[in-house]
Image (spheres, grey):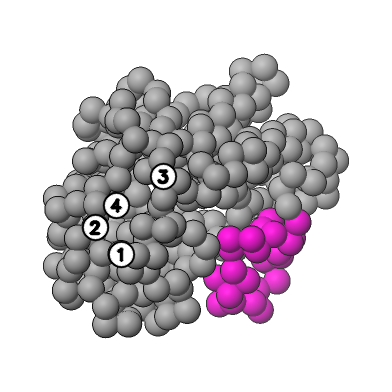
Amino acid sequence: MAKRPVAVVTGGAGFIGSHMVDLLLARGCVVRAIDDLRGGREANLGHHRANPDLSLDRRDIRVIGHDDTVMADARFVFHFAGIGDIVPSIERPSEYMSINVQGTVAVLEAARHARVAKLVYAASSSCYGLAAVPTREDHPIQPQYPYALSKLQGEMAALHWHAVYGLPVNSIRIFNAYGIRSRTSGAYGAVFGVFLRQKLAGKPFTVVGDGTQRRDFVYASDVADAFWRAAETDISGEVFNLGAGRPQSVNRLVELLGGEVIHIPKRPGEPDCTWADIGKISNLLGWRQMVSFEEGVALILADIDYWREAPLWDPESIARATKSWFEHLRKEA
């Protein structure tokens, strides 16, 4: 009987990481999740609690060592761990560099010494800044805030480890991932979490600008499928964009969620449209969107109670939370 593959998922109790765990277990892998639960939730893995093929290591990725047993015999490493959000990165840039860059280096070194068959790095489309659309992988890079810079530098490190040490690596620049289990705590952040809590409270949706801005939303299980394909392929050293390739307006999201709207000021450094050119990932990895935007929103609404304990935002609290955003990102590139 063939030995089952071992997969390591950093950030495995987080939003996308937990969907990756779902996919890997379904495919018969032994999964080792690493998550210090700073942003992840053990409950995100609760439906696998009795599964002996899943273990959870609650350490910070920065302490993962060269000879760490968590990497022993691992075939694949999926690196999702890190910290997100724009505003906190503007206020605490060194923390973002430490976790998102040096933490990535620790994972790369552990994977290199373990001789893993493939590491797939979760990069961010924020590296492109205010990009022309649809955006290809060869688009000029222009990160607008420290979070974007830290994710870009993590990607550069991953590709450097591939070039210098021969570590098989692929990087996937995720556009706007959404789905069940997205983070509910922390700083003012993604539109879904903000709107879902407002809907539960019967409050109006705080729409930035006129709501015509579009985002390339891609459902979390489709993201996990892309990472699996990037791990299984013989291709290494490549960067792939990942979105649905079908941008949706914030107004369309409001229409699907159903509710009243209040408008708040447009923010500097935010693109009017994010739109991934997915030709490369489709052609080389055979990836296709499986969950439509309408289906994804319906799945979230069916699980809306998950967001009941999330922060409830209104125009005044948003203005306070985003003050540093307006102070430091006044000029658009």
Magenta part of the protein: which range? 34-59
Q: Which residue is mark 4?
A: 217
Eyeballing the image, is 15 above or below 244? below
Q: Which residue is mark 1?
A: 315
Q: Earlier in the sequence, mark 2 or mark 1?
A: 2
Q: Earlier in the sequence, mark 4 or mark 3?
A: 4
Q: CA distance from mark 2 to mark 4?
A: 22 Å
Q: Which residue is mark 2?
A: 264
Residue 192 % position (x, y): 33, 63
Q: CA distance from mark 2 to mark 1?
A: 7 Å
Quick one: SS at disc 1? helix
Relative horizontal placement of residue 160, taking residue 289 as reference (left or right): right
Q: Earlier in the sequence, mark 1 or mark 4?
A: 4
Q: CA distance from mark 1 to mark 4?
A: 24 Å
Q: Amino acid at mark 4?
A: Phe
Residue 53 belongs to magenta span: yes
Q: Quick check: marks 2 and 1 in contact, CB under 8 Å?
A: yes
